[in-house]
Amino acid sequence: MVASKDLQIEWRTLETLSSMVLFSLIVLVVFNFAFDLTTVRQIGVARLVPGVLWVTFSFSAIVGFARSFQIERHRDSLSALILAPVDRSVLFTGKALANFATVAALELLILPLSAVFFDYDLLAVLGPLVAVVLLHTLGLCELGTLFAAVAARVGRGEALLATLLFPVASPLFISAVKCTSGVLEGKPLSSVSNWMLVTAGFDVLYFLVAMLTFEYILED
Amino acid sequence: MGDAPILEARNLMKRFGAIAALDGLDFDLAAGESLAVFGPNGAGKTTLTRILTGSLRMTSGSLKIAGRDPRAHGIETQRIIGLISHQTFLYDDLTARQNLIFFARLYGLDDPPGKAVELLDSVRLLDRADDPARTFSRGMQQRLSLARCLIHDPRIVFLDEPFTGLDPYAAALLRATLERLRHEGRTLFLVTHNLAEGLELSDRWMILAAGKIRAQGESSGVDRTAFERSYFQHVGGPPAGGAHA
Amino acid sequence: MRGIKDVLTVSLLAVTAVLMFGAIYAVFVYVPDERIMGPVQRIFYFHVPSAIVTFFSVLVLLVGSIAYLWTRQPFWDNLSRAATEIGLLFCAVVLITGPIWAKKAWGVWWTWEARLTTTLVLWLILAACLMVRGYAENRDQGARLAAVLGIVAGLDVPIIYKAVDWWRGQHPVVFGPGKKNPLAPEMLHTFLFCLLVFFLLYALLLTLRTRVATLEDRARAISETLGGR
């Protein structure tokens, strides 16, 4: 229900989602300048698009992660959450879920746009692509929520979030790009199943780690 | 009112590095009693409140709330306590009603919407139920915060300088509410800078300075002026040019 | 007790110092030139042990972090901090010696191959852990948050290692399952000897750094008490 509270807030203001979408669009355009993406067909969609997509998603997601704890700072509502008779790990799950829903919504909007920008057939690969994207987004949101909590507790922690997230989540990125690339080439999911399994394991592992350590982050 | 105190603190210590913010506190709170805690800034009052409400861990000592160790029985303990602070703990972007429904759900209450209406009515905010908390004045926000605190019917209510920044109407409402809580037999732990008000609203008082209890006593029949003088004696000197509450 | 600790530390210092001279002799005089690579190959004797020590330090960090959250004793926090800093140091050694070798061997300073990438990522994570300690509002908070990060990072390192390995794989593999040992006996001896020396060096630095941190704690405690409230 923590998740639904966060989502309710989001629904009212749509602040986070809109800034994330805008940011994603800007990043996509910047990539166009940076890499001359009109030559995509030469390089091949499968080789270029995954990287662009995941960089875009992760930087935009960070905006969302930071926000999810900023809303608790304004009137110190985090203290009220700590006061409540709920397990700290429940707080983590709620926040992570809300973040996941937000980032997933973002991806839902950006993916079709990317299909238009880079001229690939989204519908042909829709199923496997969605599976890949959601699985990796889950891991990203788990780590993102965890580190956003850490960053929120320290003074000027905004820089900390990105600095922590990217190195630690690097296996996720490697796997995400590999799987997305395979899927965009039209290969079936089974061809990247070992990566998917590793990522699934990663997701489970860090879910447990976060559940166990969240109370130590919130305590003070 | 039972025989066993509802709150027992023994030798509470809290160290930040080498500094002892709380240096061996011993006190009890009887059920239904109202305790006023006075002391200068930095005396450790907020630290104490945070330890008692479970958001800060003490370095050593023992604490029992309703006969249970909060560290072992955190969830049950959190269920029976409530906290009002100078921060309201509210979500600005949600309406008053949505805020209260959230907290009702958080505390696992039946019929969250009904409870929300009930509490909104009790703090006279029902007519603004569907306005975002952002649009409320300071006094109204504190009233909403009061509703948030009481929604789960806590047995012990902790208040950390709740009168700060309140307009007279809100302050009067708060005072009336505290009196009502006392009549209802709830236990109050009131940290305040206002000596007169604190004495009026409490059964017992306690002066905290530099992490230690300097003095305590009964509140009824205390002469205000004499108390003020002795307060300054305990905490170290009045400001030049006379004192005022 | 302090007496024994001091004695042990000094003996460790003495032994390590002596053995380090031995190692330098071994690497520069004793061991023959490698057939293909020439003298530059000798970096191998510094590079690989540094890498092994770095990974070991991450393990120490993981254990120390868990221990701190469990017991809240400052010793474990000091140990974890030392492991982070010294791990960072040895990691930097790997990152510097790697490219030196790479330039000679492959003609480029840097490639994004498995081990170098992993090491770079690891360096970034350790640096971030240190950053958190710096940003924290007070000692307790810094220790707690750093411990959580220590656990996250410690668990992550093997995953990163494996993931990057699958993804690329260009690093020269000297020892591997099923491979015949390609090293001449002198080289093997030197390598193992250097490994030992590096571990001793690590142990020495870890001990010293942890003790310095403990002494710093004590000094701060005294100054805070004297400084008055």
Image: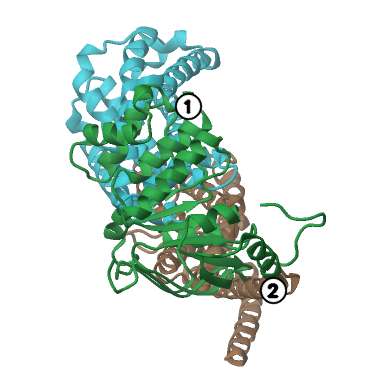
Chain colours: A cyan, B green, C brown
Taking B98 as reference, is C135 above or below it?
below
Secondary structure beneath disc 2? Answer: helix
Task: Give me the residue at 32% from left, 22% from top.
Answer: A105
Taking A98 as reference, is B130 above or below it?
above
Residue B104 is situated, as x and y percent measured from the top left of the image, at: 27, 40
Q: Disc number at residue B210?
A: none
The chain carrying label 1 is B
**Neighbour class for label 2 at 10 Å: few (<14), some, many (≥20)?**
some
Give the labeled residue for mark 2.
Answer: C225
Q: Toward the viewer: A41 or A95?
A: A95
Residue B43 shown left or right of residue C71 in the figure? right
Residue B28 is situated, as x and y percent measured from the top left of the image, at: 42, 72
Which amino acid type is marked by label 1?
Phe
Residue C172 shown left or right of residue B37 in the figure? left
Which amino acid type is marked by label 2?
Thr
Taking B76 as reference, is B129 above or below it?
above
The chain carrying label 2 is C
Task: Give me the residue at 34% from left, 43% from top.
Answer: C166
Q: Toward the viewer: A158 or A193?
A: A158
**Neighbour class for label 1 at 10 Å: few (<14), some, many (≥20)?**
some
Q: Quadrant of residue C85?
A: bottom right
Taking A20 as reference, is B187 above or below it?
below
Q: Are marks 1 and 2 on the same chain?
A: no
Secondary structure beneath disc 1? Answer: loop
Residue B209 is situated, as x and y percent measured from the top left of the image, at: 62, 67
Q: Quadrant of residue A123?
A: top left
Q: How many marks?
A: 2
Task: State how far apart marks 1 and 2 are (Cα).
Answer: 45 Å
Give the labeled residue for mark 1.
Answer: B136
Q: Which numbered disc, 1 or 2, marks the residue closer to the eye?
A: 1
Task: Give me the residue at 20% from left, 13% from top.
Answer: A124
